[in-house]
Structures are given as C-alpha cells and as structure tokens.
Image: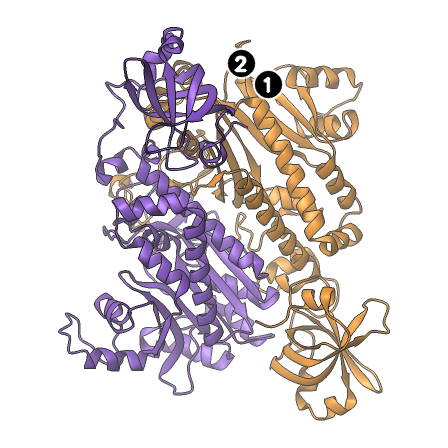
Chain colours: A purple, B orange
Amino acid sequence: MQQRIKDILHQGQVGDRVTVKGWVRTKRELKECTFVNVNDGSTLAGLQVVIPNTVAAATPAIKDLTTGAAAEFSGELVRSPGKNQTIELHAQQIHLWGGADPETYPLQKKRHSFEFLRTIGHLRPRTNTLGAVMRVRNACATAIHQFFQERGFLWVHTPIITASDCEGAGELFTVTTLDFTSEGNIDFSQDFFGRRAYLTVSGQLEAEIMATAFTNVYTFGPTFRAENSNTSRHLAEFWMVEPEMAFCDLMGDMELAETFLQFVFRYVLDHCPEDMAFFQERIDHSVMATAEQMASQPFARLSYTEAIQVLEKSGRAFEFPVAWGLDLQSEHERYLAEEYCQRPVIVYDYPAAIKAFYMRLNEDGKTVAAMDVLAPKIGEIIGGSQREERFDVLQERILTQGLDPAPYWWYLDLRRYGSVPHAGFGLGFERLVQFMTGMDNIRDVIPFPRTPGNAEF
Amino acid sequence: MQQRIKDILHQGQVGDRVTVKGWVRTKRELKECTFVNVNDGSTLAGLQVVIPNTVAAATPAIKDLTTGAAAEFSGELVRSPGKNQTIELHAQQIHLWGGADPETYPLQKKRHSFEFLRTIGHLRPRTNTLGAVMRVRNACATAIHQFFQERGFLWVHTPIITASDCEGAGELFTVTTLDFTSEGNIDFSQDFFGRRAYLTVSGQLEAEIMATAFTNVYTFGPTFRAENSNTSRHLAEFWMVEPEMAFCDLMGDMELAETFLQFVFRYVLDHCPEDMAFFQERIDHSVMATAEQMASQPFARLSYTEAIQVLEKSGRAFEFPVAWGLDLQSEHERYLAEEYCQRPVIVYDYPAAIKAFYMRLNEDGKTVAAMDVLAPKIGEIIGGSQREERFDVLQERILTQGLDPAPYWWYLDLRRYGSVPHAGFGLGFERLVQFMTGMDNIRDVIPFPRTPGNAEF
C-alpha cells in the first residue's frame, strides 16, 4: 500500500524518498516552481508538493493538476521554508490519474454552504469539514467497540427487520415485497415474512435476550424513525449504541454510562487532535473545552424529584411549565447541566407515567429506575433504565399502558425463566458525533443522511 | 462489575474469594453436598459450584436452583477433584434471582434440534452451541474492525435505505410509510422519501464515494435480499463487510483479501480456543484443520481461463457444463479448491458477460478484473473486483447491460472528477461465521434470522 500523508507528516524525515497518491486541493504556479497541495483523506492537512520547472516542463499533464484532480507524486522530502509545515515533497515524477474540469467541478476552492454540499453528497466527503467529521466519526465508533470489547461485552447484531412495534410508536417504516399496484386491502399474510414487518426503532428488547445469556452485550447498528421531522437534530436512519447488562441495577447503569462517555471523549481527543482543532477554530470555539470536560470531570447526579425542586427554585421564567410529573424540556435540561451543575448531570428516577413500560418500577410505586445523561449545550445524550424483571409487575405495566401483551410473549418469558435484574442505555451515535464536533446540523455528521424527501446517493 | 467465569477459570487461584452470577445449567444432589454448574456466557465452560449440606440447609431457595435459574454464589475457590476442571467454588452464600419452572422451561438438559431451537430464539443463546457461535461471531467482528483500523481504513456507514436499485436486482424490499389500505395505484412521490425506496443490497457504490475521499474505507453493516430462498445458505437480512481502496488494482485487491482472511482466522483461533474445540468435537471434525489452513497457507491463484482448462482436463463428470463463458458452479469451485489446489484459491479475470457492469474491462476486451476467493468445502467466500474508472467505458457498460444511466449520475461523476483506479470486495459475514464454525445452517449463526415467513423475536 502507498504511504499515507498522515504518516509522512508525522514521521517523515528529510531525505526520505516517498510516493504519495491523492487529490489536488490547490495549485499555485510561481516563477521557479509550482506548489500543489495534495490530500489523501488520512488527515486534515495536505502535503505540500513542490514541482520544479524542469520537472513541470517534462510533464505535460501538469496543466491538468487542478483542484479535484487525482495524481501521484514521487520524490524526496525536504525541509519546508513555509510556516504551515515542516516538510514538503520535492517531486521528481508525477502521474495524473484523473483530472477534474475546472469549468464544471463543483468543489472549487471557496466556502460552500452545508446546504449546497448536501446536494453533492458524492463529493462533499472531499471537503475539509466533512473529512474531519468522518475521521472523528470513525474514531468514535472505534472507541465504542474498544470500550465494550475490553470489558468483555459481546457485540450482538439485533434484527433490522422486525414484526414487533415495540414501544407502541406509530412512526415506523413498513418493509414489504407486496405488489402495491393491486387494488383493495393489502393482505400482509401474503407478504415476505407472512405478517406486516417494520424497520426497527431499537434493538433493546432483543439485546435483553442476549444479556440473559451472555451477561454483558451491546448493539451498534442502524435504527429508524419515520417521523416527519425536518429539524437539525432528526434523521430517519441513524446508528444507535445500546449496551445491556444482566445482574446490573440503575446505579451500575449510570456508572457505565459515565465511564463510557469519558472514554469516548478522551479517545477522540487523543486520536484526532488536528480534526478537533479544526472544529474548535472553524465550527464551534467551545468544542475542545466541552470534550475535555466530558472526558475528565465526574458527572453530577440529581433525582428527578430534586431536579424539579432545583428548577422551581431557579427563579427562571421557563417557556414550558415545571411540575412534578411533567417531562423535562430541553430548556430545563440545559439549565440543569449548564447553569446549576455546570457539567454533565445524570437525572434519575423519573415518574412512571412519562416513561416506557419496560422500566423498573421503584419501591415508591410512582417512579421508575430510568436515567438520562444531560450534557451542557445539547441536553439529553443518553437515556437508559433498569428493566422491570418481575413478571407480574411487567405484565401489569404492559396492560396499564394499553398495550397488547400477546406480541410480548417472549419478552415476558425472559422474566419467567432465569429472570435477573438488568439495565442498559441507548446512545444516538450521530448525536454524539454532533456534540463532539459542534456541527449544527445532524445531516452533516452522517455520510448519506435520510430525511423526509431525501434518499439520494 | 461481577467477576466473569471466564476470568475465574483462567486466572482464579485456590483461596480466592469470588462471587459469580449466572444461570444454572445442571444440578446434582449427592449425600454430602450439591453440585451446580453455573454459566454466565463469558465462556463455554461453566464453573462448578459445590454447596455443602450445611449451606444448603440454611438456603431454602436451593430447591429452585434448577436448570435455567439465575443465581449468585459467593465463596472460596478450591482445588477440584473432578477431571473436567482444576478449580471449583465452595459456596458459602447463595442468592436465587429468578427460577425456571422445570415443568415448562423448554431448555432442559438434553439434545434439542436446531430446528426446535429456532422456535425459541429468545432462549437458544443460552445453549452451548449458540453460545459458542455468538462468541466466535463477536471475535470475527472484532478481528474485522481491528484488521482495517490497524491499516488506516475508515469504517463508513453506507445507507440502509436507498432509492437506487443498483445492480438491477429485482430482489428488493420496499420501504414505505404509505397507507396500503387505499385503493388504486400507489403514488410513490407521496411516500416518505418522495420516491420509491428500498433496503440496500450492497454498500459498494457509496463506499466508492468514500474511497475517493479517504483512500481506504470499509463498510460493515446489514444488507438485504428479498429472495424467496429457503436454503441453509440464504438469509433475507445479513451483515456484509466491503472494503474499498483507491489507487488499488485487482492484484492489490487479491492481496488484501488473502491477508484479511488469514488475519480473521488466526484471530479466532487465538481468541476462541474453547469454542473452536467445541465445534471440532460436536459439529464438524474438520473445522480446526480448515481454520489453521486458512490462517497460515498462501492461497493459490488461477485465472478464470486457466480454471476452465483445469476443469476440462479433470476428467470429472460435472453436473453443470464447463465452457469458457459460463459461470462456475459450486461443484466446479469446490473441485478447484479441494482437489486441484487443495487449499483456498483465488480465481480472477472472469468473462465480462457474466459479471456486473462496474467491474473493470481488461485489455482483452472480453474479461473483467473480477476475483472470487474459493474455499474448500464452502466455495465462494469473497467476491471482488477492480472497478471501472474510465468514464466512457463505464457509461458504455451501463448501456450494454440495459441499465438506465440516469440514476447513476453521481456514480459516473466519480469518474468525471479525480477518477482513480480502485478496487474492493465483499464478504458475507454470516457465511464467514458458518465456515468458521462448521454450522450446517446459516440461520444458526445469526441471533435472529430473517427468512421467508420468519421475523419473530
């Protein structure tokens, strides 16, 4: 394999003979030589290539080394007199692989709006910002696997296609092979799976199956919401991380969530310093401080009941009402994290009535062992709970919430046979990357966003 | 977190005080004590727990420590007189978490058919075989990430929902939010994405986008086939690994595929010795030899043209005809790998007419730079190619194959702007796990198989 520009910039020595292959970002023609900045995606910075006029004269293709062109340069590393790099490449041989007509190539060197870049999703990964995002995204993903694997968690692949509408959410995509053009009512018993099937909204219930066999597991895969939300925080298709631990209560769940987030932020700070510096400078001047805080400061903890008291005493005029029993709104979450605690805070023990049926009912009979991790600026980043492991209580909760217990037969079985206290949480992966990078719109932290009206590329 | 049985069995010392939590596999009551075998999923073997009668007498719950029950045992590690283990746990404290009624718990200690186990997908991960499969599956997945990350490849998440029917395959699932009960023709412009959308069959085309920005990338995610195949080798939903490398030709592609498979097999042999020994003993007596061969022997290489000559000269009476221009059938692939080469073999340069439009046309004008890795016993395990990077040739190939070029506008653009030689391959993840473990049916190497008529759990 060829030498990566990242390795050359970090480890290259003056005098090394190297070959680099990549895409031209800029070209400047001076009197004695031509400067070309080449990027191969391995790192934010490009390598400066100096082409002496003698070499240029022998290389007719040099005129086509325009922005976006793919080329290969061989030569010797020399000390750079420039202030932006310590070494540069003196090219002796040049090969143009593929040009990029300056008249039509859409990514000329200038600022492009993120809106415009979304219309050229096949080219935008070649920009500085999307490049940095995708490297940070990869680092986050790697950190997640490393964190869980080091702790003996199994990565389990829960199904994408599911016949259960598990949280009673109406916002599901239907998956079908039926012929739509036929008239009349659709008979789903004739469909591929013999019943109506959907795209999953969460792998949690299946992860619980796996946790009651392997103790500690996690999912990391795509999930879906057919929500008609055109906001900067919603995607129809996004990746989710869901650890699930047997023999674990809410306290253990909160500890894992805190350790987990600290690990991921530290990993990215350690592995992507150039990309993070780029976000700090160009996107959001607070990302480094936020990441450093996430990585190193213990999170605060407040029960929901305490949180309500704090909000009531705050003297703030919130837009949404504050009262025990009402869900926390984004403005409340941000007040708690940013102003009251001035750091990430875990709020736990929420009223049962506003939470899902599977969360464990506390002794008080009115709250459940749920927890949310609230981060400054972003609000909820993780939501989790201890699961109801008592058969009778779970069955009662299903009925209370107006759900049909029949499709839950296997979920109830987990409480019938070898039931254990268990807990887990969910992290929206793109929300994490958005938080990490400071990017405004979640559509710009996933390679090919799916939103209402958008499924191109 | 509690101590894992895997760690206790590997590192526990006589005299250590430990607490284990898990599920009872077997219980034997003798005169002076009771033996309980406990498993927590961290490893194949359970820990033998000895409960003296004095402790048993003080623990009424002991009668409920039946197969499948969840319990917690604290005590001291002692040398085991048994021949199956070197240490065992002398329990001093026992806590029963959840029982499992022996009258109804389906997983009593006896052999169950894999067919039966599929009907209890929520409990089968608790069996020895499925447990071993899922640990090997996790090890394969971890090895895959490690292999690519160490080499600087970015993990890219290509979309699951796609509007392009990329290989012209008809076997697609439709994804929709339309109301099916309405009569008349369906107007997909009113659907969620404003057009008809499908579940992806491959992330390759989008991976090519990413490779032309980051040089080396890989996908690892779910893909789908709405094929009505009720075989032991087909799933409607399966995971696929697809690396894509810019500045790479077919030779580099073959080298990567070989190094990759060797790495994954070595990793699993090193990390799952007990599980692999189990498959060797109980499932297929050749898995260890096969894995060792995959991990250590260089693969053979034959051009398709040579392969046809070999088959023609073999003197074998094959069921399917052998002639230049016809695709290789499973019997041909197995003859080449098992008998002629007696090791994995890469066959390359296939006739253009039997391969996909995006594969690079060779200089001879009649073959393409495609390659398949054929393994003994299993046949094709990897399929890959160098991609056609020449705009005109690609456009011509699209038309020749009767495809509409319009939806490929962005794919063609990759050849218009900064085009480079590039190559990649695809590996069906479940086929790999099946090959590794020797399991007969692919439905038994994925936690929750999706096949025609099956989407339970």
Query: Residue A360 in the image: x percent, y percent?
Result: 44, 77
Chain of the residue on which disc 1 is drawn: B
The tag on residue B96 is none
Image location of residue A34, percent across then percent down: 32, 17
Q: Residue at 24% across / 43% down in the picture? A: B190
Left or right position of B365 against A331: right
Q: CA distance from mark 1 to mark 2?
A: 8 Å
Label 1 sits on a secondary structure element that is strand
**Extreme residue in the left direction:** A317
Looking at the image, residue B404 lies above or below residue A316: above
Could you say which quadrant of the image residue A72 lies in?
top left
Q: What amino acid is found at the position of numbered circle 1 in the picture?
A: Asp
Tell whether label 2 touches label 1 (CB within 8 Å): yes
Rendered residue at 22%/77% (across/down)? A311
Residue under the point 22% across and 39% down: A115
Residue A211 figure quarter: bottom right
Label at residue B349: 1
Q: Quadrant of residue B116?
A: bottom right
Q: Quadrant of the N terminus of chain A?
A: top right
Q: Which residue is mark 2?
A: B362
